[in-house]
Amino acid sequence: MRIVVLPGDGIGPEITASTLKVLELASKRFKLGLSFQPHEVGFASLKPKGSTITPEVIQACRDADGIILGPVSHSDYPPRAEGGINVSSELRIKLDLFANVRPSRSREGLKHWGRTPMDLVIVRENTEGFYSDRNMYQGIGEFMPDPDMALSVRKITAKASNRIARTAFELARKRRKKVTAVHKVNVIKVSEALFLREARAVAKEFPDVAYDEQLIDSMTAMLVRDAQRFDCVVTTNMFGDILSDLASELSGSLGLAGAVNASHEHCMAQAQHGSAPDIAGQDKANPSSLVLSASMLLEWLSIKHGRKEFLHAHHAIESALDAVLKDPAQRTLDLGGTVGTRAFTERLCREIESKVPQAA
């Protein structure tokens, strides 16, 4: 299994190194046969290559079995014409990574900020909506007719809506068998109606999965008040981006939020949080989000290739992280602890080893 590794910017190289330590251990313990192919992206690529991501790197990602992408500082990149390409969105479009899957789960021993505990997954459409840097075949979905007017075009298609809804229902079948579609059809009447039309059509194909709908504004309130009522939440691009950050923070911390960007053929693990350049190189970053994302990649590989050992490794990593986080003395600074990135990673690896000392 060839994994392309893109360390990214800011704290990206540090937490990517931590993630690779965990994966190398898991590969050894569970005989996964992982190999890692590193490539520079972001600022490390901009000066020597003239672009934050090159066609060669994109092709390497296309040819790989999986991808790990560290956080990138795309807000600080120069314009696209000067090589400042948003690495994350470029890979999502080029590889058609239409499903952004973001779990949020309260963890034993860690304070959650909502009124109730949470164990849900937000399934976010990843290729269109109001994301104007990726929703058009050519150019972007924003323009200025005059210096004092800016217009943004939102694209919603039946194909994208149908396949993201199908992803949510298939996932719900493996969980608690409930899907909630989040929308704003009372205001955005045409494009939201199209999204809901496809979600309802898919729902009819899954009679064993309960289906309901929630307005985006009331959904934010319900996440705070009664998050435990939700299982799989499916929604469009921008709503999903906002809701997943809210859910992750309410469940404990955005620093514990794993995520993958996936299609039927490709999967990219990517932390939910940003590149945090203010603490880069200081051994302060929490690697948990990228570690969890990489663990989700193992789960995806298990499903795609029918390899149970990948699923066992996924569960071992999740279980080990839960065990480490129970102890306040073992937590990183962002969670109120005093442990640095490297020490946290070493502790996590020891926990994995203790759980699977004789793994086949």
Image: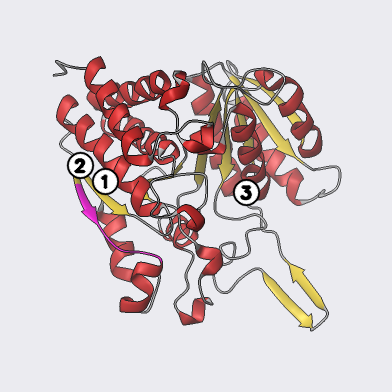
* Residue 271 in the image, given as x and y percentages of width and height: 46, 44
The residue lying at 46 percent from left, 55 percent from top is: 92
The residue where tag 1 is placed is: 65
* Residue 283 in the image, given as x and y percentages of width and height: 38, 46
Q: Mark 2 touching mark 1, by CB under 8 A?
A: yes
Hey, what amino acid is under mark 2? Met
Disc 1 to disc 3, how far (Cα)?
25 Å
| Image quadrant containing the C terminus | top left
Name which quarter of the figure residue 267 lies in: top left
Tell whether 54 sits left or right of 116: left
Hey, what amino acid is under mark 1? Asp
What residue occupies the far bottom of the structure in this picture?
A: 146
Tell whether 337 sits left or right of 232: left
The residue where tag 2 is placed is: 1
Disc 2 to disc 1, how far (Cα)?
6 Å
- On residue 237, which mark appears? 3
| SS category of the residue bearing label 3 | helix
The residue lying at 40 percent from left, 56 percent from top is: 95
Q: Which residues are magenta?
A: 36-42
Q: Residues within 10 Å of mark 2 (few under 14, many from 20)?
A: few
Q: Mark 1 touching mark 3, by CB under 8 A?
A: no
